[in-house]
Image (cartoon, grey):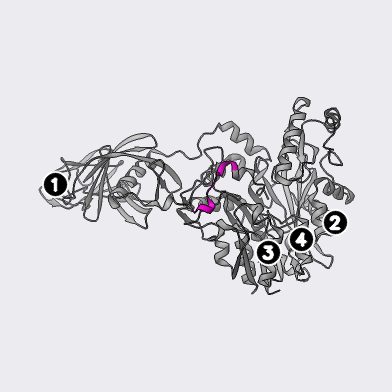
């Protein structure tokens, strides 16, 4: 796990990166995203970020040796990013994270399927629940390894954005 | 014609090399010190050094270029645009060395190179010119006399360099008080840019559009006009976006303007490729502005809507061929084409040149897209020359689809290491005035001034979130900062960008 503070377009963001088998769980100011990162070359990344959809971002990140800043091009939009020093770093210890992970409905929709049972052990990125929104089915996945502590969702139920669906311990 | 030396660099040298290859002609490059690794050198069959990076020590050195052509055993020289392309002494030197100059005669270049002589030629051909002075204003003319001339023309007036081009040595004067200082400034700028401080006065039309007519003339007396191009999107008198056909030109007006263009060209016995520029006023009257005696930067849009390869025809005309083209087809555009000139400039910092190495470059492609470029990842954009890195051209069946296609292509454009004007174009193509084509030559300057430097792209919360994720993930993937690849530019290409690039009179072609 790596926890850092970045200044993004002038705003301080707390970012925690945790390896999760085939990808990363990245928490930005406490909000966790499942990220599939493929490195293309020294400065090019392809990110697939699970939110409502599995969104694709074409990234070119280049350092400016003079200012020690990074210019991160998200598509055609350049964003200036400065790292405020590594606050805490430790060796990868498999996929782990502090505290329970809460899985929320990212937008209003209908719970189509619940794919896990309470007490079940899950792996990071394992699909947990399928929410249908705007005629698209969206799998919500585990951010890290753990055990299903509680299931708040019911199949067929409508949920609001931000509704708590599952807790992983 | 078996071998052609290209007396130029950058995207236009690459463009001419491509035409040569398709005609089974060997292309020969010349290069300055900092262009040793440039694409035009790597694409050519042969390449000869012509001196230090400063243009006046290399790309403007007539004898070195002619020597290289003779050494290479070239049959002909293509000048491209800029540098020596409109220098009659260069055309004469090439001819006197027993080589073919791919362009008009030295005499035609000389006549049309003087703005006042060109205006006289247009008048003789019965083509209206913008009201202004007949002759250059003497360098010792007293202020009172210049003021009298300005009053007779009527304010606002433009003070323009006789040898001008690309907005250099040009000043707008709205009243008498500003006149003397504007004349002094224009003279000094013209002297520095063209080695000729002569100026003249011209009335400034109210919100005109810039419309120009491409011509080809062969050595057998045929001069053919092409459908007009509109270049009204200008920043400080320099073209930024061009399109063809113009929404402001009806078939009847097209007929009148192309006929006028041909008349001017005939009046000076013009051969090869050239462009007659007009201003179109709000009442639909047009005035001769100037003639460019060379290939134009924006020539690709004409190629896109007519299917004619203008560079190949320049070569064919130079080797004596007749213009075997259907005249009606040349003024009947197929679809619509738009060009954006992508510059290594920071649009969010007053469009100042953006120094540095191109770390990454991925240009768009796909249906209807053409990217004419001399840039590549790993190369510096040298400080010595025009900072244009590529010309992005879109073609589609009609104007709305061409705009949609250009916007799609701009969204695919990836460049890192330097700032470019791509974000500016994404903004511009979304403006109502652009979409509705209700612009004129001062539209862009006015709207830029009104924005007070507000950024063209402001990251959304989503983009900022993704940038944070990307920076963190990249740090995990590569714990050590990426090496010095971005910092080490070759010594030959380093220098003082901002002052330098501005001083060069090599753009706005």
Whether residue B301 is visible, yes or no, is: yes
> Where does the magenta region start and end?
B490-499
Q: Residue at x 78, y 70 (%)?
A: B322
Categorize mark 2 by other alpha carbons within 10 Å: few (<14), some (14-19), many (20+): some
Horizontal side of B286 relative to B405 (left or right) equals right
Horizontal side of A83 relative to A169 (left or right) equals right
User: Gap in Å between the C-alphas at discs 2 and 3?
Assistant: 22 Å
Dominant secondary structure (helix, strand or loop) of the stretch shown in magenta: helix
**Front residue of this view, candidates B499 and B444:** B499
Task: Residue under label 4, please give it.
Answer: B91
Mark positioned earlier in the residue sequence (2 or 3): 2
Task: Residue under label 3, please give it.
Answer: B311
User: Gap in Å between the C-alphas at discs 4 and 2?
Assistant: 16 Å
The stretch drawn in magenta includes residue A130? no
Mark positioned earlier in the residue sequence (3 or 4): 4
Chain letter for mark 2, please: B
């Amino acid at each position: 796990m790596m926890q850092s503070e970045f200044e993004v377009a002038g705003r301080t963001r707390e970012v925690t990166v945790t390896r999760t088998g085939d990808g990363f769980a990245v928490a930005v100011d406490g909000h966790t995203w499942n990220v599939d990162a493929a490195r293309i070359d020294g400065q090019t990344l392809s990110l697939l970020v699970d939110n409502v959809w599995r969104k694709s971002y074409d990234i070119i990140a280049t350092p400016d040796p003079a200012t020690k800043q990074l210019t991160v091009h998200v598509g055609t939009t350049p964003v200036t990013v400065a790292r405020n020093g590594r606050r805490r770093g430790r060796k990868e210890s498999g996929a782990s994270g502090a505290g329970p992970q809460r899985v929320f409905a990212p937008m209003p929709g209908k719970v189509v399927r619940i794919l896990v049972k309470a007490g079940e052990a899950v792996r990071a990125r394992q699909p947990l629940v399928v929410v249908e929104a705007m005629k698209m089915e969206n799998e919500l996945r585990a951010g890290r390894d753990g055990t299903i502590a509680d299931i708040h969702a019911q199949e067929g139920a409508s949920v609001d954005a931000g509704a708590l669906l599952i807790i992983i311990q | 014609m078996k071998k052609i030396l290209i007396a130029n660099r950058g995207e236009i040298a690459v463009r001419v090399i491509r035409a040569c290859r398709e005609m089974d002609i060997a292309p020969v490059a010349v290069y300055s010190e900092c262009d040793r690794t440039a694409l035009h050198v790597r694409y050519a069959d042969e390449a000869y050094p012509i001196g230090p990076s400063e243009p006046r020590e290399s790309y403007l050195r007539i004898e070195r270029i002619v020597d290289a052509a003779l050494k290479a055993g070239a049959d002909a020289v293509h000048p491209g645009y800029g540098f020596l392309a409109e220098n009659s002494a260069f055309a004469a030197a090439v001819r006197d060395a027993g080589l073919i100059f791919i362009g008009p005669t030295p005499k035609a270049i000389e006549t049309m190179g003087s703005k006042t002589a060109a205006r006289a030629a247009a008048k003789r051909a019965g083509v209206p010119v913008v009201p202004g002075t007949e002759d250059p204003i003497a360098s010792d003319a007293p202020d009172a006399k210049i003021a009298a001339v300005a009053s007779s023309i009527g304010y606002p007036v433009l003070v323009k360099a006789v040898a001008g081009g690309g907005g250099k040595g040009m000043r707008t004067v709205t009243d008498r008080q500003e006149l003397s200082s504007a004349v002094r400034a224009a003279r000094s700028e013209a002297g520095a840019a063209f080695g000729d401080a002569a100026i003249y006065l011209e009335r400034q039309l109210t919100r005109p559009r810039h419309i120009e007519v491409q011509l080809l003339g062969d050595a057998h007396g045929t001069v053919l006009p092409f459908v007009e191009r509109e270049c009204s999107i200008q920043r400080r008198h320099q073209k930024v976006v061009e399109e063809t056909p113009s929404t402001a030109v009806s078939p009847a007006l097209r007929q009148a303007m192309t006929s006028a263009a041909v008349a001017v060209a005939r009046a000076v016995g013009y051969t090869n490729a050239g462009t007659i520029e007009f201003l179109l006023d709000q009442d639909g009257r047009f005035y001769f502005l100037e003639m460019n005696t060379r290939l134009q930067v924006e020539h690709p849009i004409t190629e896109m809507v007519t299917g004619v390869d203008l560079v190949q025809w320049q070569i064919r005309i130079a080797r004596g061929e007749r213009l075997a083209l259907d005249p009606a087809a040349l003024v009947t555009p197929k679809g619509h084409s738009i060009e954006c000139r992508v510059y290594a400039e920071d649009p969010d910092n007053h469009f100042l040149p953006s120094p540095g190495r191109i770390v990454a470059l991925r240009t768009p492609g796909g249906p209807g897209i053409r990217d004419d470029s001399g840039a590549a990842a790993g190369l510096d954009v040298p400080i010595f020359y025009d900072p244009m890195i590529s010309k992005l051209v879109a073609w589609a069946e009609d104007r709305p689809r061409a705009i949609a296609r250009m916007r799609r292509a701009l969204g695919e454009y990836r460049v890192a290491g330097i700032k470019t004007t791509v974000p500016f174009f994404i903004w511009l193509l979304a403006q109502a005035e652009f979409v509705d084509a209700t612009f004129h030559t001062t539209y862009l300057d006015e709207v830029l001034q009104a924005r007070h430097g507000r950024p063209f792209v402001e990251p959304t919360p989503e983009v900022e979130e993704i940038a944070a994720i990307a920076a963190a993930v990249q740090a995990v993937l590569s714990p050590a900062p990426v090496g010095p690849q971005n910092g080490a530019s070759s010594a030959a290409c380093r220098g003082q960008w901002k002052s330098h690039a501005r001083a060069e009179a090599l753009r706005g072609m």
